[in-house]
Amino acid sequence: MTTLQSVPALGTHPASGSLPSRAETRDQLSRATYDLLVIGGGILGISTAWHAAQSGLRVALVDAGDFAGATSSASSKLLHGGLRYLQTGAVKLVAENHFERRAVSREVAPHLANPLTFYLPVYKGGPHGAAKLGAGVFAYSALSAFGDGVGHVISPAKAQRDVPELRTDNLKAVAVYGDDQMNDARMALMTVRAAVDAGAVVLNHAAVTGLRFTRGRVTGADLKDSTDGTEFGVTARLVLNATGPWVDHLRKMEDPNAAPSIRLSKGAHLVLKRTRPWRAALATPIDKYRITFALPWEDMLLLGTTDEEYEGDPADVAVTEADTAQILDEAAFSIKDQQLSRDLFTYSFAGLRVLPGGPGDTSKAKRETVVTEGRGGMLSVAGGKWTTFRHIGRTVMNKLAALPGHPLAEDMEPMNRLPRKLPLPGIANPNAVAHRLLVDGPAPGPRMAPDTARHLATHYGSLAFDIARLANEHPELAERVHPDAPEIWAQVAYARDHEWAETADDVLRRRTTLTIRGLATDDVREGVEKLLADRD
């Protein structure tokens, strides 16, 4: 590992994009009265803050942990139309999901999303026949206006050329369709940046200790900065509770008698090294309703997911041995044993889906967004999924505009008058960015490695050039954080100065892929902590 010299915070004026200190942000949050305080920095809260700031409202966003630190960075990493929804006849929902998926992956964030071909293997004795799945993927692609090609059926031999670890015993045919995937933590972080660019003030690692009331109405929150213990408060005309699995906890702060509004479902995933390259993903039907995924992602293989009711503390959610065994057993339907060896494990994670309260199997529950207003006027929003994160933000904003008395309507631009497909920061063709990074390297020094250039291009877009300049100015930052990963130390300094990274986990788990690759060693963690401590 490289020996890092002290690299103080870089950039000291707004044009550089450097962030204000936490003390400056706390002071700013404490002194102003905001139109909207969003509590919760998952993608639902982030998207709402982004749209609210676009509409002209004065917006504050806080989170007890890191942005996307819980469920929003524990998804299946997919932007998808929802193939299984066709079974329930939800044709309109699939079409709407496809619209949002295409908008994000083609126009809003093409630098952060990439197309992925899916294979659905049809085995003898399986829950679905080839004719049914063939018709299903054709209809699915039709609802996407055939933007990813025409859903069709191919032979097992052809599928195995793209997925070498595909199990072909009793394999009758393979149905083919297209969706998209992403790095969810990076997508969330860029959305935070978009919200700030639009005027929002944000702070992570700031936990709500209590709500503020004025004549029985919720008018802000008291908070504690977990990095140094500083207590402060935020005053707002309206407070939005977007705390995901903790939504009912905050509702009880508003009204101790508030009845539960949600239930939780746990989804666990495993990350493994790949034994050979995969050029397509597997979506294997387990029963009539459930599918298990095997996704090539970040040079590895992502397996999952589970779907079972969860009643414990959201902070304690974790992958259990039972989860691991279930995921491996289900993956074994379509994947050869050598790819499922536990020796290949690099990481595992679990997230909690927020579902509307009520009876029934969680695997069959709709991923609906629920917006409620409490006794003290606090709005609570929960549910939904990653694919429709922009739509959810617009939905909440329309709800704000329609509140009784219209407290914010006069101060906000209507959603239908705002750009429908405003891009996220860094938008660029990632292939062009990677090419530029390789061609435009420093003349006297070594060129950037191709895998590093590709990684920067697909995780930062055009903002990758800022990281390249940082590496050029400080040669020690051009070195790899770990020899087996594409990340370089300049990304750590950039995360510190421009991406609100406060802890080693913020960097290793969400700003980079080092943790999920199983490479967050003690030496790496020590180096990251040292660089974070060098901030001004």
Image (cartoon, rainbow, N blue to C red):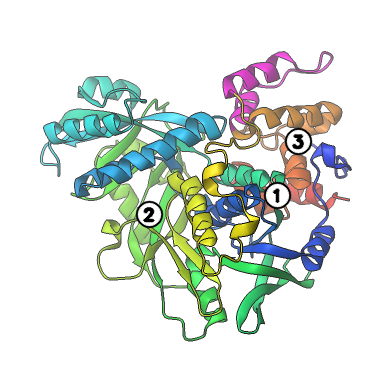
How far apart are labels 1 and 2 at the CA level? Answer: 26 Å
The magenta-colored residue range is: 429-458
Q: Mark 2 points at which residue?
A: 324
Crowd class of label 1 (few under 14; some 14 to 19; many from 20; radius 10 Å):
many
- The spot of residue 98 in percent (x, y) is 37, 37
Using the rendered image of the protein, determine whether residue 319 is visible from the camera's viewpoint: no
The dominant secondary structure in magenta is: helix
How far apart are labels 2 and 3 at the CA level? Answer: 35 Å
* Residue sitting nearer the eye, 39 or 174: 39
Sequence-first tag of 1 and 2:
2
The residue shown at (29%, 33%) is: 143
Task: Left or right? Give the position of 212 relative to 348.
Answer: right
| Disc number placed over residue 490 in the picture, else none | 3
Rendered position, 364 above or below 285: below
* Residue sitting nearer the eye, 29 or 131: 29
Q: Name the residue under label 1.
A: 525
CB under 8 Å between discs 2 and 3: no
Sequence-first tag of 1 and 3:
3
Q: Does the magenta stretch include residue 241?
A: no
How far apart are labels 1 and 3 at the CA level? Answer: 15 Å
Residue 440, image quadrant: top right
